[in-house]
Amino acid sequence: MQPSMQLGCSTAETISQSEAVRCAGVSRINIQKQLKVGWIQSAGKNKVDLASFNAWLASKRYFDQTVKLSQTWIIPYNPSLPIFKNLQDAELSNASYKARLKQLDCDFKLGAVVRIEDVVDDLSSQLSAIRTRLLEIPAEMASQIFNCKIVVEIQGKMYQLMVRALEELSEDEQWI
C-alpha cells in the first residue's frame, strides 16, 4: 500500500503491524510506541485496530501539515480546525495546565522558584550600586593624584585606589 492511501475503505477491522508500518511510512518501533502510549489500539498479537490507526494517521498528517506551515512562518487561520482532537484531549490539557499551576505555586511558596520581576529588581539595584561606586572613583582619585609629581607616583596612587574599589565591590554582603 502507498503511504497516501486511506485505509478506512477496507472492510477488515484490523491490519497487521507490518501493513500499518508500510501505510504510515514510519518504522515498526514508531508503531509500537504509538500502541504503547495508546494512540493506536492493539487488536491482538501483531494486529492493529483499523479505526484507531486511521484516527492516528489522520492526526499525524494534520500535525505534519501544521509543522510544514509553521516552518514557513505562515499559519493560516481556520476556525473549522479543532485545537484538540476531542473533548477528552481538551480536558486532559486543562487538567495538566491546572496541575502545573499548582506545582508552580507550591514551588514558589517553598522558595524553589522566584518571580522574574523580583530578580530583575534585585539585579537592577545591585548593578546601580556598583555603577555608582565605579563612578565615584575618578572624583576620589582627583584629590589624591593632584599633589603627585611624577608619573610613577600617579600610577601607584591610581593602582592603590582601583584595588581598594575592586575589593569593596568583591565583598558579597555589601552588594548582594
Image (cartoon, grey):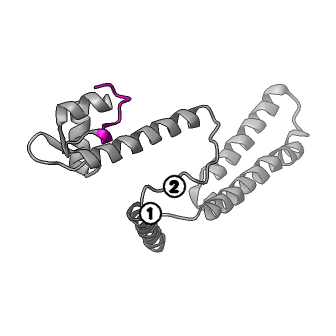
Task: Please state if 12 lies on the left or on the right of 53 as rendered.
Answer: left
Q: Position of residue 110 (x, y in %)?
A: 43, 72
The residue that label 1 is drawn on is 90
Q: Residues within 10 Å of mark 1 (few under 14, many from 20)?
A: few
- Amino acid of disc 1: Ala
Q: Quadrant of residue 46?
A: top left
Is mark 2 in CB contact (under 8 Å) with mark 1? yes
Q: Residue furthest left?
A: 45
Numbered tag placed on residue 83 in the rendering? 2
**Main secondary structure found in the magenta portion:** loop
Badge 1 marks a residue whose secondary structure is helix
Q: Residue at x 39, y 40 (%)?
A: 60
Badge 2 marks a residue whose secondary structure is loop
Q: Position of residue 17 (x, y in %)?
A: 18, 36
Q: Residue at x 17, y 48 (%)?
A: 42
Q: Position of residue 2 (x, y in %)?
A: 32, 25
**Residue stretch in magenta:** 1-9
Q: Residue at x 24, y 31 (%)?
A: 21
Asked if the magenta segment contains residue 100, the reply would be no
Separation (CA) of disc 2 from disc 1? 8 Å
Asked if the magenta segment contains residue 4, the reply would be yes
Q: Quadrant of residue 175?
A: bottom right
User: For this rendering, which residue is in front, 36 or 156?
Assistant: 36
Q: Residue furthest right?
A: 146
Task: Please state if 12 lies on the left or on the right of 118 as rendered.
Answer: left
The quarter in which the C terminus is drawn is: bottom right
- Amino acid of disc 2: Ile
Q: Total number of numbered labels?
A: 2
